[in-house]
Image (cartoon, rainbow, N blue to C red):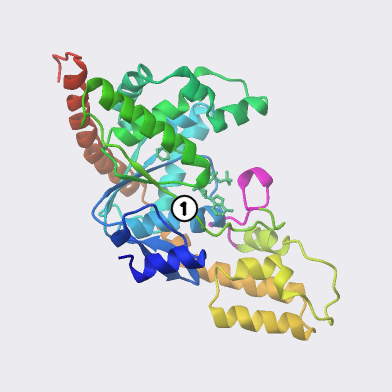
Amino acid sequence: MLSIEKTACLSSGKYACLRLSDNEVRVDKINGFQYMAGVTNKRILSGVQPSGILHIGNYFGAIRQFVQLQEQNENYIFVANYHSLTTITDPDVLRKNSLDVVIDYLALGLDPEKTTLFLQSDIPEVTELAWILSTVTPMGLLERAHSFKDKVARGISANHGLFAYPVLMAADILIYDSNYVPVGKDQKQHLEITRDIAEKINLTFGEGTLVIPEELIQKEVAVIPGIDGQKMSKSYGNTIDIFAEGKALKKQVMAIVTDSTPLEEPKDPDNSHIIDLFKFFASAEEVEAMRQNFLAGGYGYGHAKKELLQAITEYFEDARNRRKELVANMDYVEEVLRKGASAARETAQSVMERVRTRTGLLKYLK
Ligand code: ADP
Ligand code: TRP
């Protein structure tokens, strides 16, 4: 018997569905947006590239799920700084971005009591596992990876790190016996590669050598539009940043693209980037009120932008304050990372012991 939620999920097509067993599916509605809960008592792992300033697309598309999943699961989140070496070569930038992303995630609600938060570079065993995995990974599997092919097509010179990226990513996941990996659609193929590699290891060295993980992809996750209506993305330069404030935030919001309908005239609420964004921050009633204002006329885009600006400012106010506290208290942030690394490393070392035993790699020094 399918649960009611699962039936709604499948029949309406409106809800995000996770690839879970029937009794684990649940649909939640928060701030008017559905997203999935119902994954409980599992080890959830995800990696985040420390690539700079976070925008509201990152929040609604990814961070909010991590914060929600930590309530009923064992949550591991790490900063993928080994991965970033394939693109960032300035050590100051790498250091700064790595700590910034940790501060941002803590400010946005990751709770170090519930989430093991750490830097990838604190777990050197992951590179050892990556090597072992690479010995069973067919070249063809990596040659077919979209993200590698895309980068090469864009003229980014192909170093071995970029080519082997999916193998390190597989190691990231497999070294913690992870059950579920919440990722965006763009990472789906990397998860398939991870499963292929893990299955090959189990075939070669015996069942149970590695746990086979599942991806958690929200099928219908809302794509947050940028200020020009395209998908919000750093690479399109159309972002509204989570921690922007004052003039900087105002500038981003005021730059939302509109048509030139004069203030007095009615406007189309169904084709407005302002309303599309407002939906993420306002109640259904507030959105309806703005729609009515659009239809009535005498309400300019400037008014609507001001309302949106106010809503965004309030929505992230606590996170902004918390961020400032964290920046003033870096000892605490570093302690979180030390504790996280120590817990993650314990898991990684125990999995590596199993892998070394199964593969016949001797080791005399502890
Ligand atoms: P960007 O496109 O700005 O480089 P990333 O690729 O680093 O963003 O995305 C990090 C995470 O945020 C991913 O899980 C991705 O799915 C999510 N994300 C990014 N932009 C959006 C968006 N506009 N809408 C929904 N989710 C998004
Ligand atoms: N490749 C992921 C990205 O670009 C980041 C990442 C690295 C990751 N290792 C991971 C995500 C392991 C999930 C699990 O977003």
Quadrant location, the N terminus: bottom left
Q: Residue furthest front?
A: 1
Residue on which disc 1 sits? 62
Q: Nearer the viewer, residue 350 or 179?
A: 179
Q: Does 106 lie within the magenta span? A: no
| Residue 9 visible (yes or no) | yes
Left or right: 248, with 52 as reference point: right
- For ligand 2, the image quadrant comes to top left
Q: Is residue 82 above or below residue 264?
A: above
Q: Nearer the viewer, residue 37 or 9?
A: 9
Q: Residue at x 50, y 55 (%)?
A: 61
Q: Is residue 35 above or below residue 156?
A: below
Residue 135 % position (x, y) = 35, 16
Query: Does the closest atom of ligand 1 sit within 8 Å of the Cβ of label 1?
Result: yes
Q: Is residue 256 above or below residue 295?
A: above
Residue 9 falls in image quadrant: bottom left
Residue 72 falls in image quadrant: bottom left
Q: Residue at x 33, y 65 (%)?
A: 2
Residue 277 % position (x, y) = 62, 66
Q: Amino acid at mark 1?
A: Ala
| Residue 161 visible (yes or no) | no
* Secondary structure found at label 1: helix
Residue 192 % position (x, y) = 43, 36
Residue 290 falls in image quadrant: bottom right
Residue range highlighted in magenta: 231-245
Q: Does 243 lie within the magenta span? A: yes
Residue 339 % position (x, y) = 24, 43
